[in-house]
Structures are given as C-alpha cells and as structure tokens.
Amino acid sequence: MTSRERADVVVVGGAIIGSSVATFLASRPDFDGRIVVVERDPTYRTSSTTLSAASIRLQFSTPLNIEISRFGVELVTHPDRYLAVDGEVPEIDFVENGYLFLATEAGLATLEHNHAVQRKLDVPVTLLTPAELRARFDWLRTDDLAGGSLGLAGEGWFDAHALLQGFRRRARALGVEERAGEVIALERDGDRIAAVGLADGTTIQAGWVVNAAGPRAADVAALAGVDLPVRPRKRFVYHVEAPVSLGAAPLTVDPSGIYLRPEGPAYIAGFSPLGGQPDPDAIDLVVDRAPFDELVWPALAHRIPAFDRLRLLDAWAGLYEVNTLDHNAIIGPHPTLRNLLFANGFSGHGLQQAPAVGRGLAEWIATGAYETLDLAPLGYERVGRSEPIRELNIV
Ligand SMILES: Cc1cc2nc3c(=O)[nH]c(=O)nc-3n(C[C@H](O)[C@H](O)[C@H](O)COP(=O)(O)OP(=O)(O)OC[C@H]3O[C@@H](n4cnc5c(N)ncnc54)[C@H](O)[C@@H]3O)c2cc1C
C-alpha cells in the first residue's frame, strides 16, 4: 500500500533534538503548520538520548557553545516555562553538583585559557590549585595535578528520559503528529527536498525536512545525495558501586579523559578515546567490558584511591554522533538544498544543546532567521570550506 500526504515540516528522528525542534516550533504563535515527526524506534531504547550520561555544563571553550548550554540550563532549571501541559510540569531532577575538569602541568594552559573565556561570559567557575582541590575534595589524589576548574552553578545532570518525554508530551499537546516509521527516501526537486519516503510506502510532501537522526544522520543526508561528516562512534558507560561515598561530588573529568559522576547512591564512568587512539565507526550497541578493567578502573583508582575496590554493577553502550571535522554541531540549512535543515554531529554534547538548537531551528523555519542566539557559525558551510571550529573541552 502506498499513500501520499503533505506536511509543512517533517522531522526525521523524534528523540531529544527532533522533539525539541517540534516543540519549539509548535509553541510559536506565528507558526500554525502541520509538523510530523517520523521515528524508526518509538521506544527510544536505542537512541543516544536515552543512553547518554545526561549531563550539562557551561565549561566550554567557545562562547557559542557556552551560550547554547546556558539556554539548556535555563530549560532544565525552569521546565515550567517551556514544557508545562495543563499545568503539569515534567520532573527533570536536575542535580546541580557542577563539573570539575582536572589538569596536569601539560593541560594547565588550556584550563586557564578556557577559564578566561568562561569568566568573560560570567560563567560561575573557579580555578583551584592542587591544595585547594585537596581541601574541597578529600577523596581526590592531587600530587600529580597542576589545577582544576570547578563549575559553581548551572552544571550537573538530569533525567534525560524525563526531558524527552516532557518535550514529546508538550509537542503532542500542541498538535505535533508522531509517526512510527523509517525514512528511506528523500525526493529532490531541483534545489529543494520535495518529499520524504517511509519504509511503509507512505510519501509525505514536505515544506521543510529536519535531519534529527542522531548517529544515523549521515545516512539520512545521503538519501538526498548530501555528504555529512557525522559518524556513529560507540561509547561505554560503566555503572559502579564504590565502598565509600564521595558526597555531593561533581562530574569529574580526569586528565586521562575518564569521567565519573554520582548516579543515585552509585556512580557512572566512561571515556572517549584520546586523539590518536582508535575510534572506529560502529552502529551496534554491544558492550565491551575490557576497557573498564584496562583503562577506566585503573584511572579511577589512581585519582580516587578509595576506588581501588569498585564493583561493576552494569554497563551499556551508546553512540556518539561524531562530527569528524571539529566535534561541534552542524546546525541549519544546507547551502543549496535550502529546505533541508541539519541538527547533527553533536559529538557528545547534544542533550544539553537540544533546547537552544530546537529553539533556533524553530526561529529559522518560522521567520527565516535566528532571533535569539545566532547559530550561523555552526552552519554546514564550514564543512564545505573545511573550516573547523575548535572546541577544546570535549568529553
Ligand atoms: C554514552 C553517551 C553519553 C553522553 N553523554 C552526554 C552528556 O552527558 N551530555 C550531553 O549533552 N550529551 C551527551 N551525549 C550525547 C547526546 O546523547 C546526543 O548528542 C543526543 O542525544 C543526540 O540527540 P539526537 O536526538 O540527535 O539523537 P538520538 O537520540 O540518537 O535520536 C535520533 C533518532 O533518530 C531516529 N532515526 C534515525 N534514523 C532514522 C530514520 N531514517 N527514520 C526515522 N527515524 C530515524 C533514531 O531511531 C533515534 O531515535 C552522550 C551520548 C552517549 C552515547
């Protein structure tokens, strides 16, 4: 069976990015078009959104990334302002314990550089000497550290699933249609996408198409003959029980690249390969426990001596959608296919960027311009010109 229908906006992928775009657009008084969100896994069990570490920080090195996350903080702190439905507000459970970036002598100059950028933008962050670190966090080994950068407010973690459901609920309440299905074709008509084809034979003529397909974004772009430098890369999260409590510890990023944060009474830890280490494309979610024994546990036991007696409770894999050009998001229209909008390549920080990106693309669709934050520097054009934006704080 085949059928043909029409929508003003078709969003490919309904997880945090797709549902944020749909929600912000449907919330606008100047937009009353039909929005259809197509999702191949309506359980969202395989989406990066629900498999993420769900943390948010202001400690970036580029001013735009700081401002993008600042709006994320605004939304997770005040969901009542953006996600209420009939007076009900989702419980996002924001735990505002901060991020702590640690540096050895080799990393100190970067830490200080980032600090200067952040302070210029009034980010509440403080640089700590090893002695100050030790005084604040008595569980931390500091003899090989040169300093640390601690976020004092507006950083922490939250319930990603609750945020996703909050966006979806609000979107549905505003008339957004959710469609279970897989987008398998994008029909081109000259310099625009004319229609979206679904695996079940449905064709939806589209005014706008938003690529919110996460780690599969390059496959979706390829349906329109567009090359997108976004690759699926596996990241493991290890859920561990420790013999001691670190209290209200921040999300701590060790110079080895390994991060750790409290998760209820236990902890989660993970890492991204450092530059030069292998990081192959992968679309499966099979967990490898070897990196825990070989890398994660030794690094944690070194930094937090009491953690030499950890117990691995559980582990899962999720997919980063890595922008191989510069590990930053690609947002906005394709330079020639103007009704194809990207919201891709978040490289590990897409959950916190979803509110600002959704708001920005809604502005673009409704008015043809960004009204609040100018997201144009993150546009696709830099890909064509091979002009990376350097973000120094990638986790
Ligand atoms: C282990 C891990 C830890 C992370 N930690 C953090 C963190 O602490 N903070 C942070 O901000 N970010 C973090 N991230 C990154 C963050 O999770 C992602 O950047 C974000 O969730 C991306 O959202 P998305 O909606 O673009 O992608 P996804 O959540 O992957 O959603 C894409 C959706 O598109 C659907 N889809 C794909 N192709 C099609 C198609 N052809 N047709 C229909 N539907 C399709 C998929 O089924 C999927 O549901 C982490 C990621 C991982 C893996």
Image (cartoon, rainbow, N blue to C red):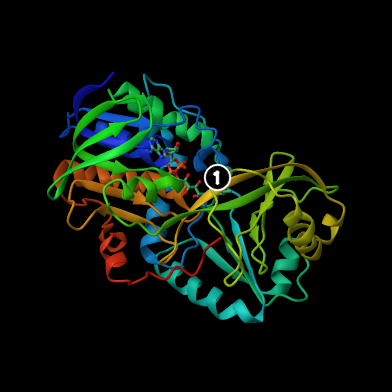
SS category of the residue bearing label 1 = loop
Asked if residue 92 can be seen in this view, the reply is: no
5 up-or-down from 25: above or below: above
- Residue type at mark 1? Ala
- The residue depicted at 46 percent of the width and 74 percent of the height is 116
> Quadrant of residue 290 in the image?
bottom right
Please give the residue where the numbered disc 1 appears in the rendered image: 54
134 or 159: which is nearer to us? 159
251 or 181: which is nearer to us? 181
Q: Give the farthest residue toward the front.
A: 1
Residue 185: horizontal and vertical position, in percent?
A: 29, 38
Q: Give the farthest residue toward the left.
A: 190
> Quadrant of residue 317 in the image?
top right
Check mark 1 vs ligand 1: CB closer than 8 Å? yes or no: yes
Q: Is residue 128 left or right of residue 319?
A: right
Q: Quadrant of the N terminus?
A: top left
Residue 366: horizontal and vertical position, in percent?
A: 17, 41
- The residue depicted at 57 percent of the width and 41 percent of the height is 51
Binning the other alpha carbons within 10 Å of mark 1 as few (below 14), some (14 to 19) or many (20 upward) gives: many
Residue 240: horizontal and vertical position, in percent?
A: 76, 45
- The residue depicted at 17 percent of the width and 56 percent of the height is 336
Q: Is residue 256 left or right of residue 243?
A: left
Q: Is residue 258 left or right of residue 384?
A: right
